[in-house]
Image (cartoon, grey):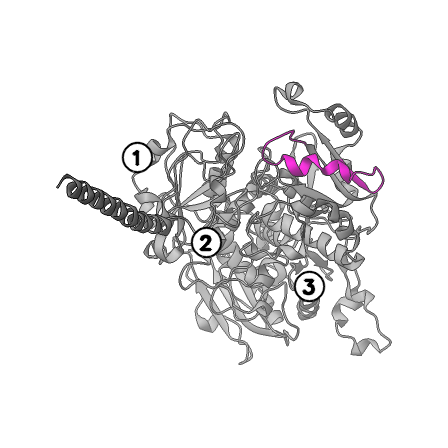
C-alpha cells in the first residue's frame, strides 16, 4: 500500500512538472510575442547619447504633434481674410536677446503686423525662444509655465516658434527645447530631415548675433568679376572639437590640408578649459591656424567647406554664400534652410562625412561652367533671402502663406531667380511674362496718369490742357487718367479737350476717400490701368509728343526701370552725417522724378501693398516725397539705377502770375532730405544707385533726310 502511494505521488509530481514546463513555456512565448509588438520598428537615433549622463530630462514630443500637418494642426479659418501676424505684448520681467528683439522689430514694422489678435492668422511669442541651450546667458527659464499663461496659446495652434539653438552639452538634442511646442510651427535652425515635419516646420539658417536687422550687406562677388581660378580650390578655418559630437569630421580635416590649393586649418583654442582637454596636435594646429586670415580665405577660395559643428548647422554656411565661395556641405542629414522652395543643387555641393577623403576629387571634377553657375546662384540666394533677419523672417512667412487655401504658390523659377519670391507678388499675375523682370516683347501701348494736386484751370492756354493734347497725339497711348487730388470739384466733361475716340479720358477723384493717402493716389493700382507701361505726369509738366514717344521707346527696352526726364541726385554729407538731396546738374543722377517718367504698372502694386506702413506714414504726413519713395522701391527691386532721357526744354514752366513754385522753395528740399534719410533707415540701407547714362535721340542719327526722322522736334533743338 505504501509503495502504491509513493508511485502515485511520483506520477502526480511528474505530471505537475511537465505541465509547468510546457504550459509555462507557452505562457512565456505568448507574453514575449505581445511585448515584441510594442517594440519600435527601428532604432531611435535621437535617443542615442554620448558622453556623461544628462542631468535634465528632456520634454518628449507627443506622437500627435510629431505627425502634425497643416490640415490637422492649423486653423485655416483665421486666415481667410488676410495674412496678419500678432505679437504678444512684451513681458516687463524679461528682456529678449538682441537678435530676438530685431526679429520682433522687423515684424512690427512690416505689412504683416496687426495689433488685433482677432485679425491674426499667425501668432509670435514675446518670449525669447532663439537660444534653448541651458548654458547660454540668453536661455529663458520656466518657459513652459510662461507659455501656458499666454491667452491665445491653444496648445500652439497657429503659432510660429523661432529657434536657433536647442539642447546643450553633451547631446545637443534637436528636441531639447525644454518646453512643449504643441502644434506650433517650428522655424528652426540645424534641423534634421528625420525630425522636421514635412510641409509644416521650416528650416532656417543659423545667423550671428551681429546679423543685420534690415537691408544687409550685398554679396562680395561683383557681377563683372568672376575669376574661375582663385588662389585656393578648397578652404576651411574654424574650431576643432577634441571629443564629442561633431569632433569626428573636424578632427580629420588635417588630412586634406596641403598648404597649396587646399587649406584646412583648425584650432582647439576655444572654451574655458581647452588647455586641459587639448590633444597632441593642438599646438601645431593652432600655429597653422594663425597663419591664415579668415576673410582672405573666404574671398580667395572657389569652394568653402561647411562641416557640421556641435549641431548640424554652421555659421560658415551664410558666410560662404555671401562671399560667393561655393559651400561644400559636410553635415549628413541636415535639412537645408528653406529647402521647400530653394533648389540648393544650383548653389551648393553635397559631400558625405564618411567619405571625407573623396572631397578634393569631387570638387576638382566640377567644370568651370558649373562653377560659374554655382557662384552666381550663391549671390542671388544671399541677397534675396539671407542677407538680413528681415529677409529670413519674411521668407518664413511667405512659405507659410503659400500653404494656405486659395493662395497661389510661386514656382521654383520665381524662388530661385532674381528678383526672388519676396518681390514677386502672386496676386498680381500667375504669368511670369506680366512682370517687369520677364516681360515679353511686343508691348506697344501705355496708360498716362496725370496727377492734379493744384486744381489747375482746364483752358486751352493752361499747361494741363496742352499736356493732355500732347499725350493724346502719341500713337502709343491707350488711355489718359486724371487723378484729381484737390478739394475743388473737377471741371465738367465739356471743359476737357476733345480727344480721338480711341483715347478715352477718365477723371478720378480720391480726395474724399480717407483710406488712401492723397499724395500716393497717383500710384494707386486702378483697374483701368490695363497696359504694362504707365506714364506718370504732373499737371504742370511740359512735354511734346515726340518726347513722350521717345521715352516710351526707351522704356520698352528697360521695362523694369524708371525711364524719364527730370533727374535728381542723392549724396552723403560727411559734415552732417546724413544723406543729402540736390537738384543741381551734375555728371550723374540717382533719381528720376515721376512727374514725367515711365514705369511698369506692377510697381503700383508693390508701392501700395508691399511697402512698410512706416514709409506710407512718412509720405502721408509730409504730403511729399512719394516720387522719391517710388525710386527707392524700383532701385531696391532691380538693384539698378533709373534711366534719364534728354529733352528739348525745361521740365516745368514758371508758375503763372508770378506765383511761387514749390520747386524753388528751400523748405521743400529740406523736407525731401528728411524723407531721404527716413526711407534709408526703414529700408535698412541706401538702395539708390548713381548713373551717368543719358539716352539722347540726337545720337541716334541715321542717313535720311531731316523730315523723315522719328523725333524731329528734339533733334532740331539739340541739347
Coordinates of residue 604 in the picture (x, y in percent):
53, 59
Q: Picture quarter containing residue 638?
A: bottom right
What residue lies at 40% left-to-right and 31% top-to-bottom? 57
Q: CA distance from mark 2 to mark 3?
A: 33 Å
Which numbered tag is attached to residue 149?
1
Label 2: how many Cα within 10 Å (few below 14, some 14–19, many 20+): some
Q: Assign a secondary structure to mark 3.
A: loop
Provide the residue designation for mark 3: 558
Does the magenta run of residues contain 243? yes
Work out which quarter of the rendered image holds the N terminus and state it: top left
Front-lying residue, 411 or 466: 411
N-terminal of the pair, mark 1 or mark 2, is 1
Q: Assign a secondary structure to mark 2.
A: helix
Q: CA distance from mark 1 to mark 2?
A: 26 Å
Label 3: how many Cα within 10 Å (few below 14, some 14–19, many 20+): some
Q: Nearer the viewer, mark 1 or mark 3?
A: 1
Asked whether disc 2 touches disc 3, contact meaning CB atoms under 8 Å apart, the reply is: no
The relative height of residue 253 versus residue 358 in the rendered view (above or below) is: above
The relative height of residue 428 versus residue 333 in the rendered view (above or below) is: below
Tally the numbered discs: 3
Which numbered tag is attached to residue 400?
2
Residue pushed farthest bottom?
A: 501
Coordinates of residue 388 in the picture (x, y in percent):
58, 42
Work out which quarter of the rendered image holds the C terminus and state it: bottom right
Which numbered tag is attached to residue 139?
none
Span of residues in magenta? 240-264
Coordinates of residue 541 in the picture (x, y in percent):
61, 60
Amino acid at each position: 500500500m505504501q509503495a502504491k502511494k509513493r508511485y502515485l505521488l511520483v506520477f502526480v509530481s511528474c505530471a505537475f512538472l511537465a505541465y509547468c514546463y510546457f504550459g509555462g513555456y507557452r505562457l512565456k512565448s505568448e507574453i514575449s510575442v505581445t511585448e515584441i509588438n510594442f517594440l519600435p520598428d527601428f532604432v531611435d537615433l535621437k535617443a542615442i547619447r554620448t558622453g556623461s549622463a544628462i542631468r535634465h530630462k528632456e520634454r518628449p514630443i507627443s506622437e500627435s504633434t510629431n505627425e502634425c500637418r497643416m490640415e490637422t494642426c492649423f486653423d485655416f479659418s483665421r486666415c481667410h481674410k488676410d495674412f496678419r501676424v500678432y505679437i504678444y505684448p512684451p513681458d516687463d520681467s524679461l528682456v529678449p536677446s538682441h537678435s530676438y528683439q530685431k526679429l520682433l522689430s522687423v515684424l512690427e514694422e512690416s505689412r504683416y503686423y496687426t495689433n488685433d489678435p482677432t485679425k491674426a492668422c499667425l501668432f509670435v511669442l514675446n518670449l525669447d525662444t532663439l537660444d534653448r541651450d541651458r548654458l547660454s546667458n540668453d536661455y529663458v527659464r520656466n518657459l513652459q509655465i510662461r507659455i501656458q499663461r499666454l491667452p491665445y496659446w491653444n496648445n500652439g495652434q497657429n503659432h510660429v516658434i523661432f529657434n536657433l539653438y536647442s539642447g546643450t552639452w553633451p547631446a545637443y538634442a534637436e528636441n531639447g527645447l525644454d518646453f512643449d511646442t504643441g502644434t506650433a510651427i517650428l522655424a528652426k535652425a540645424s534641423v534634421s530631415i528625420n525630425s522636421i515635419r514635412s510641409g509644416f516646420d521650416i528650416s532656417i539658417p543659423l545667423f550671428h548675433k551681429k546679423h543685420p536687422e534690415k537691408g544687409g550687406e550685398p554679396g562680395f562677388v561683383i557681377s563683372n568679376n568672376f575669376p574661375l581660378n582663385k588662389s585656393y580650390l578648397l578652404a576651411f578655418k574654424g574650431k576643432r572639437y577634441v571629443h564629442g559630437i561633431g569632433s569626428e569630421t573636424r578632427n580629420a580635416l588635417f588630412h586634406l590640408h596641403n598648404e597649396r590649393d587646399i587649406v584646412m586649418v583648425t584650432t582647439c583654442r576655444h572654451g574655458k578649459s581647452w588647455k586641459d582637454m587639448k590633444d597632441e596636435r593642438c599646438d601645431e594646429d593652432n600655429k597653422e591656424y594663425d597663419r591664415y586670415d579668415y576673410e582672405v580665405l573666404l574671398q580667395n577660395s572657389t569652394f568653402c567647406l561647411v562641416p557640421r559643428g556641435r549641431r548640424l548647422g554652421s555659421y560658415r554656411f551664410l558666410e560662404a554664400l555671401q562671399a560667393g565661395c561655393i559651400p561644400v556641405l559636410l553635415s549628413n542629414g541636415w535639412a537645408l534652410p528653406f529647402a521647400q522652395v530653394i533648389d540648393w543643387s544650383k548653389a551648393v555641393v553635397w559631400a558625405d562625412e564618411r567619405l571625407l577623403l573623396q572631397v578634393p576629387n569631387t570638387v576638382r571634377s566640377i567644370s568651370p561652367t558649373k562653377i560659374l553657375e554655382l557662384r552666381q546662384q550663391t549671390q542671388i540666394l544671399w541677397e534675396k533671402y539671407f542677407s538680413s533677419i528681415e529677409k529670413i523672417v519674411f521668407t518664413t512667412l511667405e512659405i507659410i502663406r503659400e500653404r494656405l487655401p486659395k493662395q497661389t504658390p510661386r514656382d521654383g523659377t520665381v524662388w530661385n531667380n532674381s528678383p526672388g519670391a519676396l518681390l514677386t507678388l502672386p496676386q498680381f499675375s500667375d504669368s511670369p511674362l506680366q512682370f517687369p523682370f520677364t516681360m515679353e516683347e511686343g508691348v506697344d501701348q501705355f496708360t498716362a496718369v496725370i496727377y492734379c494736386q493744384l486744381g489747375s484751370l482746364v483752358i486751352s492756354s493752361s499747361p494741363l490742357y496742352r499736356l493732355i493734347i500732347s499725350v493724346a497725339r502719341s500713337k502709343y497711348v491707350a488711355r489718359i487718367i486724371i487723378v484729381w487730388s484737390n478739394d475743388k470739384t473737377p471741371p465738367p466733361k465739356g471743359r476737357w479737350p476733345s480727344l480721338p475716340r480711341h483715347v478715352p479720358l477718365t477723371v478720378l477723384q480720391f480726395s474724399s476717400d480717407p483710406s488712401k493717402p492723397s499724395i500716393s493716389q497717383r500710384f494707386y493700382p486702378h483697374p483701368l490701368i490695363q497696359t504694362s507701361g504707365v506714364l506718370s505726369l504732373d499737371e504742370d509738366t511740359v512735354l511734346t509728343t515726340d518726347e513722350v514717344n521717345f521715352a516710351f521707346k526707351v522704356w520698352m527696352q528697360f521695362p523694369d526701370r524708371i525711364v524719364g526726364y527730370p533727374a535728381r541726385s542723392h549724396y552723403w554729407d560727411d559734415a552732417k552725417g546724413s544723406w543729402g538731396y540736390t537738384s543741381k546738374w551734375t555728371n550723374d543722377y540717382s533719381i528720376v522724378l515721376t512727374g514725367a517718367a515711365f514705369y511698369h504698372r506692377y510697381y503700383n502694386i508693390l508701392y501700395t501693398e508691399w511697402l512698410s506702413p512706416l514709409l506710407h506714414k512718412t509720405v502721408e504726413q509730409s504730403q511729399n516725397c512719394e516720387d522719391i519713395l517710388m525710386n527707392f522701391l524700383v532701385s531696391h527691386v532691380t538693384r539698378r539705377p533709373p534711366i534719364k532721357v534728354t529733352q528739348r526744354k525745361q521740365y516745368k514752366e514758371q508758375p503763372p502770375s508770378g506765383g511761387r513754385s514749390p520747386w524753388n522753395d528751400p523748405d521743400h528740399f529740406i523736407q525731401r532730405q528728411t524723407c531721404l534719410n527716413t526711407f534709408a533707415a526703414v529700408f535698412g540701407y541706401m538702395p539708390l544707385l548713381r548713373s551717368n547714362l543719358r539716352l539722347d535721340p540726337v545720337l541716334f542719327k541715321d542717313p535720311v533726310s531731316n523730315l523723315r526722322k522719328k523725333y524731329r522736334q528734339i533733334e532740331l533743338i539739340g541739347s
